[in-house]
Image (cartoon, grey):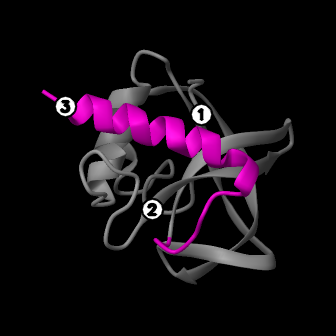
Amino acid sequence: MPTLPLFVFGTLRRGECNHHYLAGAYDRVLAARLLGFTRVEPLMIARQPGSTVDGELFFLTAATCSATLHECDSLEELTPGSLIGHEYRRIAVRVQTDSGEFIAWAYSRPDADSDADLQPLVAAESQRLAAAKQP
């Protein structure tokens, strides 16, 4: 499965209190916009047509991607071996930058789903997480 960048909009951004989860784990960052989503709380996003959430797109290094996503999943209290938790869900999204569109991971409200054509990426990541959880 390809390594997807991570779109962040809150405390994982540069200069914010949880950025240390990403520090040293990426080789490029771009200003980005997530179309079709809105902030429903200061640190929560949900789908809303016509809205935009500004953030940053982090291109995680291949060597650190899995461990970094695991740490971020833990921060967002996702169920171990799963892409969903009580308050957040990691979904695949389309992110706009000045360099073009990218497919990325983002943490959203648990009732948000990835677009239908991105579901194979989510399924592959779910399988990887489940396999990693096995002894």
Residue extending furthest left?
Answer: 135
Q: Going by the image, does 45 lie left or right of 64? A: right
Residue 134: assigned label: 3
Q: Quadrant of residue 106?
A: bottom right
Residue 29 in the image: above or below residue 33: above
Which amino acid, by three-letter code, is at mark 3?
Gln
Residue ID for mark 2: 89
Magenta span dominant secondary structure: helix
Tell me residue 134's x, y (percent): 19, 31
The foreground one among 75 and 2 is 2
Q: Would you say residue 124 sits in the magenta stretch? A: yes
For the residues labelled 2 and 1, the Cα–Cα distance comes to: 16 Å
Residue at 33% over, 64% down: 85
Quadrant for the C terminus in the image? top left
Question: Which residue position holds label 1?
Answer: 4
Q: Amino acid at mark 1?
A: Leu
- Dot 3, crowdedness within 10 Å: few (<14), some or many (≥20)? few
Cα separation, mark 2 vs mark 3, equals 21 Å
Residue 81, which numbered label?
A: none
Quarter holding residue 50: bottom right
Q: Quadrant of the N terminus?
A: top right
Look at the numbered discs 2 and 3 and tell me whether their residues touch, using CB distance below 8 Å: no
Residue segment shown in magenta: 109-135
* Residue shown at 31% from the left, 57% from the top: 78
